[in-house]
Amino acid sequence: MEPRPKARLSFAPTPLGPKPADDAEPERPSFDDATSDLELLGRFHTGDHAAFAALLARYQRAVFNFILRSLTERQVAEDLTQEVFLRVIQGAAGFQSQAKFSTWLFTIARNVCIDHGRRMKHRKHASLDATASDSENAARLVDRLPHSQPGTDRSAASPRIRERVQRALESLPQEQREVFLLRQVDDLPFAEIAVICGIPENTVKSRMRYALERLQAALADYEDDATLS
């Protein structure tokens, strides 16, 4: 049976509702950075679609980047980001305000990635070649890791370093990779990551330490190779 096509959410959300007349200014949501996530979610629950558009604009890029760096396939990341926010819509009424909205959101994103991994467990990847987007993601990770090369040498070696870091990141166990991404890329505190992953905070810190050790070892191996060459 053919799967039903999913509704898609725009990555550049436009105001929801009736299309304005040609000579009329489009209505803009009256929200700013001071409006809390919980207030926006509450207003959406009462029927204010512009409040959800504001939440989407606030978090869609962070969720997309988390999924992209977890799975490294842009089209898959786009599709799963849609799924995350559709789950937010479906679960808005049952959200418990004792938790932070961002914690709930990234918990959904993590679960979506896990569900996708289970679906893909017995499928073979079409290619192991790194894409341009993979290299861009690795470049961001490189900037966050210690590095001893001078600026000019580092610039010349960047493509090889990015490839090495990207491969090291992909080789991390899933539980270490997700902790690393939530901490280093999304800048979440350890306590919040512990809630998202459903593990003790000390376990989060241990996984983070192991991930950093493996990634730094990948760079150290590269520097050793470069010294010998």
Image (cartoon, rainbow, N blue to C red):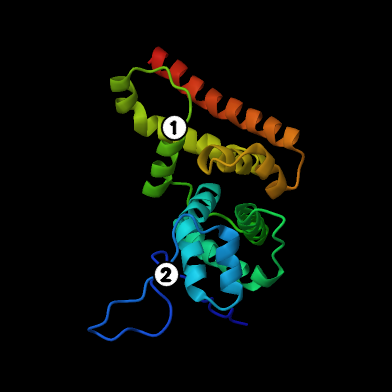
- Residue 142 disc label: 1
In the image, 108: left or right of 48? right
Name the residue nearer the viewer: 63 or 112. 63
Of tags 2 and 1, the one toward the viewer is 2
- Residue 194 position within the rendered picture, expressed as x and y whole percent measured from the top left: 71, 43
Name the residue type under label 2.
Pro
* For residue 31, above or below residue 71: below
Going by the picture, which residue comes out furthest to the right? 200
Q: How many marks?
A: 2
- Residue 201 position within the rendered picture, expressed as x and y whole percent measured from the top left: 73, 37
Residue 143 placement: quadrant: top left
Name the residue type under label 1.
Val
* For residue 5, above or below residue 142: below
| Quadrant where the C terminus is found in the figure | top left
Residue at screen point 26% across, 82% down: 24
In the image, 190: left or right of 169? right
Task: Work out whether mark 2 precedes mark 1 in sequence or the reverse, and give the earlier one.
Answer: 2
- Residue 6 position within the rendered picture, expressed as x and y whole percent measured from the top left: 54, 76
In the image, 18: left or right of 73? left
Residue at screen point 55% across, 62% down: 80
Whole-Å distance between the Cαs marked 2 and 1?
38 Å
- Residue 183 position within the rendered picture, expressed as x and y whole percent measured from the top left: 58, 39
Can you identify the residue that label 2 sits on? 29
Residue at screen point 61% across, 68% down: 42
For residue 126, say whether it is visible: no
Name the residue nearer the viewer: 171 or 50. 50
SS label for mark 2: loop
